[in-house]
């Protein structure tokens, strides 16, 4: 094998001798021109072919192996290795396509509704401080690790971790499992967008007003917070009372789910060259629509109040650990870290691509997009809060007129007597003075509470925005553009998520199928499992998957990624790799965050998440049709067992693969590079053993050692072998 130098008639020099020399016979097909010149030294490695033999001077000791004709750097203890492009591996057509792909993958629905929700929940502008800090200390270092290691080793998530060490191969498997689980429910959000998109093709949007029976609004809709909320729960999702009440299929969502998976398949089946071209549209179109919404939203009444609320910091919130936990978690989901998609994308780049510059540019685009969409969202929320505040005050005024009919003959007289600002002053004074009866009757309209209640998870996109859209001129056009934008965001993220799974399976060579067939199997199985989301309890199952499927597994995977690259592969070696690929010197910021800060952040995040789960049982919101309100409910025990199963399914490959390979439980070890299979392989021999730049595509050729003189060596005695 590559790493074993053996020949019965001779012995290796004793360890006290600094260096020995011998000839290494390498099977290979000679270059024709070289052979004509009598030089037979340049060969290609092809197992099982008619190959000629060349000789090359090899010097070695216990620390390194030098090959004649290969430049060795004693200072860095590495062999200068010339990389040739893997002709079989797909590549981006150009740099712009790569940028579009990563932006489309990383910038998703979370930037539209999750970031603004966390911003208002955690102190408004104060949340921007931990978000930026966590981006610098946690997001950027891990971003470069994933893009850099994928580009250096030229393989997908499974191949990367097998190449670093066979026992770490479970990291890639866990990434693929997490990506698959997230893809299951993430595509359901695209399904909801498709349904709303199709319902937008009408002059009167169906969620603009309450349905009527005999000229009277439906009671459930009247009790609901708005017609948009009623349409969301009653018509779109046909929501049941709990997660266990499946209630049969919701057929319009079932059809939308199938259409969504067909769209994903058509865009991904040809690989990155097809999905990369689609990403030109999925990456740019949301920015066009967001800009249109920005221009329209800033002109709405009350928009500046919402904008001011976003950047009004509540610095006391910075003392809460949950704020920092939310900031770090949002960085993970926003940048797509830990899913394997970025490793796959990086592996399609040229070997000398400047990945450090890419990381800085893409991280800036991501954080700028979050801020930009948050401004648009808070302008719309400000408009809604302004209207709801006005409605609340008018309700109070109607109560005042009923309490003091002699003073105010009708509602208009109250309205003309008090402005909104004057009424706010009355509420602040608790109606001290002539209207003290209102002290116990007033709703005490609170702008902070109103704007907080308007922003919550998926409701921000499907309830709040639809409420705002019906206030725009010609609402169907705005609805069409908005949900087309959400579909584009969702599709872009799905491309990267599935690409991580597909690339892992292809690189592992466990499944010998063409990409269209493999993609069809993945999309088909995901659509079948996703049928649970098309039931009346589908919304609750999405919440269950969202809470458990990715979060805990993602934390473990991210932590193990940092450990694998920085402490197993070696941060010094990785720094040399980055410098080799970029031609630039790596600053101490990267090495310090890789070695200390990032691992600490990942471990603290995971421990904090687990502790918070045990301190309070996980809950979800159920819809009560009698009150038309959402009620917080604890998950039933069987649902928590399903959640535990998903967490174990995501984390278990880390442990299983380690034990299988550590204790050689199973002989078959697919996708383990030849260099990694040998015990005690040094840095130089690992480089020497590579016949191609992609570790997982190496072929094993036999190497024989021919006897020759040994520098400073004694008379040879028989010795069986020496492992390099």
Image: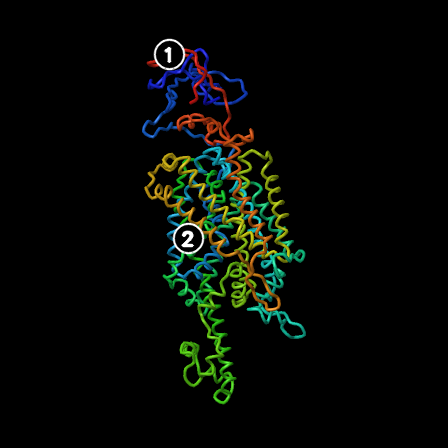
Which label was assigned to residue 367?
Answer: 2
Q: Nearer the viewer, residue 281 or 686?
A: 686
Secondary structure under the numbered disc 1 in the rendered image: loop
Residue at label 1? 709
Q: Position of residue 283 (x, y in %)?
A: 49, 50
Compared with 640, 477 (above or below) is below
What residue occupies the far bottom of the structure in this picture? 406
Colour mapping: rainbow
Residue under the image location 55 percent in, 31 percent down? 665
Q: Position of residue 415 (x, y in %)?
A: 47, 81
Compared with 458, 223 (above or below) is below
Compared with 87, 195 (above or below) is below
Would you say residue 470 is visible in this rendering? yes
Q: The C terminus is located in which quarter?
A: top left
Q: Is residue 474 left or right of residue 321?
A: right
Q: Nearer the viewer, residue 39 or 217?
A: 217
Which label was assigned to residue 601?
Answer: none
Residue under the image location 40 percent in, 16 percent down? 12
What residue occupies the far front of the structure in this picture? 615
* Disc 1 versus disc 2: nearer the observer: 1
């Amino acid at each position: 094998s590559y790493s074993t130098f053996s020949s019965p008639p001779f012995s290796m020099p004793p360890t006290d001798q600094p260096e020995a020399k011998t000839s290494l016979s390498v099977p290979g097909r000679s270059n024709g021109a070289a052979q004509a010149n009598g030089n037979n030294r340049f060969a290609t490695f092809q197992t099982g072919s008619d190959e000629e033999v060349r000789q090359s001077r090899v010097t070695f000791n216990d620390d390194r192996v030098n090959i004649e004709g290969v430049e060795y750097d004693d200072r860095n203890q590495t062999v200068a290795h010339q990389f040739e492009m893997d002709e079989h591996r797909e590549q981006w057509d150009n740099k712009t396509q790569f940028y579009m792909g990563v932006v489309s993958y990383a910038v998703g629905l979370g930037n539209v509704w999750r970031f603004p929700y966390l911003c208002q929940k955690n102190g408004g502008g104060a949340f921007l401080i931990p978000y930026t800090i966590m981006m610098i200390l946690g997001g950027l270092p891990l971003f470069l690790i994933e893009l850099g290691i994928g580009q250096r080793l030229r393989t997908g998530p499974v191949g990367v971790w097998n190449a670093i060490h066979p026992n770490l191969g479970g990291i890639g498997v866990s990434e693929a499992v997490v990506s698959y689980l997230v893809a299951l429910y993430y595509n359901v959000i695209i399904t909801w967008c498709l349904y709303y998109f199709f319902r937008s093709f009408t002059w009167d949007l169906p969620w603009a007003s309450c349905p009527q029976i005999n000229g009277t609004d439906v009671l459930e809709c009247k009790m609901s917070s708005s017609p948009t909320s009623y349409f969301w729960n009653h018509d779109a999702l046909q929501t049941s009372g709990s997660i266990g009440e499946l209630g049969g299929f919701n057929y319009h969502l079932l059809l939308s789910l199938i259409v969504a998976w067909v769209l994903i398949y058509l865009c991904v089946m040809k690989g990155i060259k097809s999905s990369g071209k689609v990403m030109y549209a999925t990456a740019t179109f949301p920015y066009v629509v967001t800009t249109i919404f920005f221009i329209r939203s800033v002109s709405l009444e009350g928009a500046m109040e919402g904008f001011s609320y976003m950047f009004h910091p509540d610095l006391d919130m910075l003392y809460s650990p949950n704020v920092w936990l939310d900031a770090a978690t949002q960085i993970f989901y926003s940048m797509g870290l830990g899913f394997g998609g970025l490793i796959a994308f990086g592996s399609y780049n040229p070997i000398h691509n400047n990945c450090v510059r890419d990381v800085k540019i893409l991280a800036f685009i991501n954080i700028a997009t979050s801020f930009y969409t948050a401004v648009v969202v808070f302008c719309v929320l400000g408009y809604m809060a302004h209207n709801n505040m006005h409605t609340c005050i008018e309700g109070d005024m109607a109560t005042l007129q009923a309490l003091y009919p002699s003073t105010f003959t009708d509602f208009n007289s109250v309205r003309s007597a008090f402005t909104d600002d004057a009424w706010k002053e009355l509420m602040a004074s608790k109606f001290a003075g002539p209207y003290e009866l209102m002290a116990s009757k007033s709703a005490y309209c609170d702008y902070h509470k109103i704007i907080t209640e308007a922003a919550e998870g998926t409701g921000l996109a499907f309830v709040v925005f639809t409420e705002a859209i019906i206030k725009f001129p010609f609402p169907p056009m705005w609805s069409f553009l908005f949900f087309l934008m959400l579909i584009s965001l969702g599709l872009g993220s799905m491309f990267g998520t599935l690409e991580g799974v597909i690339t892992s399976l292809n690189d592992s060579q466990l499944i010998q199928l063409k990409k269209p067939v493999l993609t069809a199997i993945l999309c088909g199985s995901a659509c079948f499992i996703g049928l649970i989301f098309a039931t009346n309890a589908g919304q609750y199952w999405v919440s269950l998957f969202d809470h458990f499927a990715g979060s805990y597994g993602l934390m473990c995977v991210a932590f193990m990624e940092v450990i694998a690259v920085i402490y197993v592969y070696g941060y010094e070696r990785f720094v040399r790799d980055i410098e080799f690929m970029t031609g630039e010197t790596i600053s101490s910021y990267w090495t310090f965050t890789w070695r200390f800060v990032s691992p600490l952040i990942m471990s603290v995040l995971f421990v904090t998440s687990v502790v918070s789960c045990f301190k309070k049982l996980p809950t979800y919101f159920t819809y009560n049709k009698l009150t038309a309100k959402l009620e917080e409910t604890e998950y039933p025990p069987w649902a928590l067992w399903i959640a535990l199963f998903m967490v174990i399914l995501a984390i278990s490959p880390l442990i299983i693969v380690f034990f299988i390979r550590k204790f050689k439980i199973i002989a078959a070890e697919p996708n383990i590079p030849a260099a990694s299979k040998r015990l005690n392989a040094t840095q130089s021999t690992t480089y020497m053993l590579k016949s191609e730049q992609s570790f997982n595509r190496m072929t094993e050729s036999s190497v024989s050692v021919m006897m020759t003189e040994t520098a400073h060596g004694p008379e040879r005695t028989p010795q069986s072998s020496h492992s390099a």
